[in-house]
Image (spheres, rainbow, N blue to C red):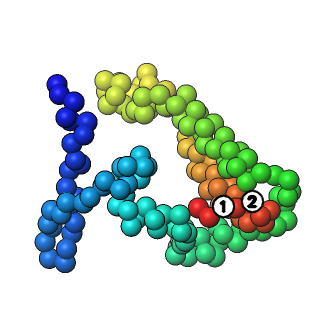
Amino acid sequence: MSDDSATASPAPLLVKSSSTISSESVDYSESTAAGAYYYLCPRAAKALPQFKYHGQDCSLIYKHILSPLAQYIVDNWTPTWAAPNSITLFGLCWMVVSYGLVWFYYPNMDEGNPAAAGGDDGDKTVPPLWPFAFTSIAMLIYQTLDNMDGKQSRKTGSSSPL
């Protein structure tokens, strides 16, 4: 194997035009010279530090229920000393517990299925359904806490551009 493969130029970039897809070579020499932004052209590498994320959710449930609920909890119940990442981590704990419960009660995801037991449904015990109810509640708690962490970071002034 020769050492030429390490210095070979990258594959051409496919650029979609208005009617067809054409192959256009992109010069990565400037971006690879610095070792960073290998996959970005120089113009994109210059624009990256000015990037500002503007996320938007147009869901009516989010707009009228979930976001106001998270804002209310942050404004009235969340102390200012609580770190935003700890709020998300607390929500993640709910999800880990719910996944553990489902794994414990349904390790093969076919429990309670007579066909999986060879057709003899008399010997097959049906596991409880409450882990699924717990998982749905845990998902609601997680998404609310995840929503709250952004609101908490803006409240405490610890938010970043991303």
Residue 141 seen: no
In screen coordinates, is 88 left or right of 57? right
Q: Residue at x 74, y 59 (%)?
A: 158
Where does the image place residue 117, in percent across and percent down from the top left?
36, 24
Q: Residue furthest top?
A: 123
Above or below 7: residue 81? below
Which residue lies at the image location 85% right of the left edge and 53% below the top edge?
81
Residue 31 drawn at (x, y percent): 37, 54
Q: Nearer the viewer, residue 44 or 84?
A: 44
Position in image of residue 137 (x %, y %): 63, 51
Q: Looking at the rendering, in which quadrant would you find the N terminus?
A: top left
Secondary structure under tag 2 reads loop
Is residue 20 shown left or right of residue 69? left
Identify the residue at horizontal 18%, vertical 63% (top origin): 24
Residue 92, numbered label: none
Q: Is residue 18 above or below residue 126?
A: below
The residue at the point 13 percent across, 72 percent down is 20
Q: Nearer the viewer, residue 26 or 69?
A: 26
Nearer to me, 114 or 37: 37
On the image, numbered disc 1 is attached to which residue?
A: 160
Q: Amino acid at mark 1?
A: Ser
